[in-house]
Every structure is written in C-alpha cells, then in structure tokens.
Image (cartoon, rainbow, N blue to C red):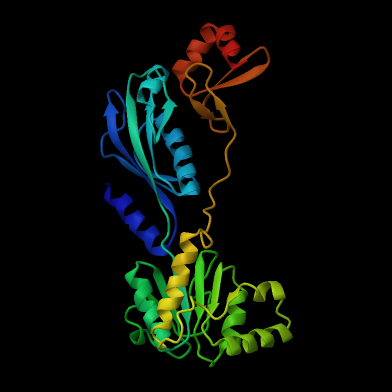
Amino acid sequence: MRPDVLELASDLSRRGEPFVLATVVWRRSPSSGKEGSTALITPDRRVRGWLGGACAEPTVIREALRALEEGTPRLLFLGAPDELAERGRAGVVTVPIACQSEGALEVYVEPVLPQPHLVVIGRSPAVAALASMGSALGWRTVVVDDGGSPGDYPAAGRVVTSLDLKAAGVGDRTWIVVATQGHYDEEALEQALATPAPYVGLVASRKRAEAVLGYLRDRGVPQEALDRVHAPAGLDLGRVAHDEIAVAVLAELVRERATGALAGGVETAPARHEALDPVCGMTVDVATARYRGTHAGRTYYFCSAGCLARFEEDPARFSAVMG
C-alpha cells in the first residue's frame, strides 16, 4: 500500500469516517492494474491510489459505494463478457470490460466502517469503567467531565472538561451515556437529547430517572424526545456495585448494536446518471463520458475511442442491441 494511502486510511479511521479499500488481488496482462495495487475510496467518490485504467475505475467506485452502504466486502472480476460465466461464483461480482484489451482484474473491495463512538458524561466509577471497557473494545471513547482533567481518565481516547457535546464530536453515530450521579443530570440529558445520537442512556435509579424526565417534561422537552432515553441505562443485572453498572450499560449497547438498532447508515454521493456502452456493455457515467455518438436521433456513450470507432462502422447493428 502506498504511504499516502496508508496515512489517509489511518487519519480517516482516527476521525471515525467511513471509506473503502480496494486491492487488486489478481490480474492478467495487459491490464494496467498490478497485484497489490490499492486505492482508498471515500463516500463522495474520491479515489486515492491506483487500481487500473478508465474501464476499471468507474466500476470499482460504483461497487465500492454499494459495499459501503451494505457494510459487506466483495470480490470483483472485471473481464471480457464471454468469460463472465466461467468466473462467476458465490460471492463474486462479475463485470464486463472490453476496451480493446484482453486484460482482466480481480479486485477485493472492503468497506471500513467507523468503530462505535461512545460519549460518557459525568464523574463516577461507572464513567471510568465505561471509558476503560469501551476503549478495550476499540471504540472511540470520549469522557465529558465538567471540571475534570485528562489525567483522571487515562483509558479514554479523549476528555472534554466542560459540558460541550459539540467539542466531544457528537453526531448521528454517537452513543451517549449520562452518568452525572445527580450533579447535573437534567442539564446533561437535555443537551444529549438536542443531538441526533441514536442512543441516550441515563445512569440512575428508576425513581431518580422518573424525576429527571418529569423535570424536563415540565421544561417543555417533547415527549417524543424523552421517549428516546434509556432509563435506567443498561441491562437489569440486579443490585451491582457502582463500577459494575458499566458492565450492564456496555451489555445493553452491545446487544442493541448486534440487533442493528444502533447501526448508523453511511451517506454516499448520489447515484450518477449512467448508460451502457452498446459495443462492450460497460457502464459509462453520462456526465463525464468523453466519447459520444448519435444514431437516429439517439445519443450513445462509450468507454473508449475504440468502442466509439466500432460503433461508427455499423451504428445500426449496435443500436439494435440497445433496443
């Protein structure tokens, strides 16, 4: 992997941004792609690195975005149309490419989704335990402790020393746990509910939780927002020690994640207007197509000058293929 691609992958992972790694695992000359060539593809269709020429790259980008949306990897075979059936098998996406080349590629496309982003608010044994266990799982863990210091939570990825959820990086893939132990439950919970976080939990007894929710209801917080709160947060493990509460909360988060309830979608660039090259069957992006031809008042788009030339030799034949 090229150093700049590796550095970008590390930076995106650290910031919790999704991307796709596409790696050439097999090639047949004269394909311009080489075994081990890797590219990084972001949801906005930008590509860093090298995979192959004009025929391969648009297809890999399209399949990379599909992999990102579905969260599943895939192996692509890009080759001549007459060998697709032979190469097709379970788990392989076959794509025709011609482009006057006898080359072919197999590209492994792997989506890299962000690790969970856990923001814990407060200062208590439960906060420290959640930060430690979340970090041990590889989650991006942030502690928000109004008046604390980074040295108080060595296991946390980051510590924010004021009640500032924007500084904590809260977004629509963040899980928030309020564990302020009665010090500023109401203020912390109200701020948490003002965010798009898919999980908001309150560590408190059932009676205390009802009082906090009642206070916010009286302040005009909509019931729809209050219904988002998991209170008391965590699975019911019975009477447990304060730091063991973190186990109950973590167990609930893991369960919710496993069921898909906390799965955040990945927004990718809008689908482009595409057309089939009538000569080789390749998918061509209409907006950026360099090669175009017309016949009987209809415009056709081509992946290469060679395909355009073949079309112009017998346009009626190829336009009939398109129907």
Image spot of residue 52 (x, y percent):
35, 33
Q: How many marks?
A: 0
* Residue 143 can be seen, yes or no: yes
- Determine the image quadrant of residue 11: bottom left
Locate the C terminus and report the quarter of the image it occupies. top right
* Residue 159 can be seen, yes or no: no
Side of 71 relative to 229 (left or right): left
Image spot of residue 19 (x, y percent):
42, 51
Side of 244 relative to 252 (left or right): left
At horizontal 55% and vertical 64% (from top left) the residue drawn is 172
Image spot of residue 97 (x, y percent):
42, 24
- Determine the image quadrant of residue 113: bottom left
At horizontal 57% and vertical 40% (from top left) the residue drawn is 271
Q: Is residue 100 above or below residue 7?
A: above
Please state which of residues 287 and 273 is positioned toward the viewer in this rendering. Answer: 273
Q: Is residue 96 above or below residue 171?
A: above
Please state which of residues 115 and 14 is positioned toward the viewer in this rendering. Answer: 115
Most extreme residue toward the bottom is: 183
At horizontal 37% and vertical 84% (from top left) the residue drawn is 150
Please state which of residues 227 and 38 is positioned toward the viewer in this rendering. Answer: 227
Please state which of residues 315 and 183 is positioned toward the viewer in this rendering. Answer: 183
Image spot of residue 137 (x, y percent):
35, 68
Side of 184 relative to 4 (left or right): right
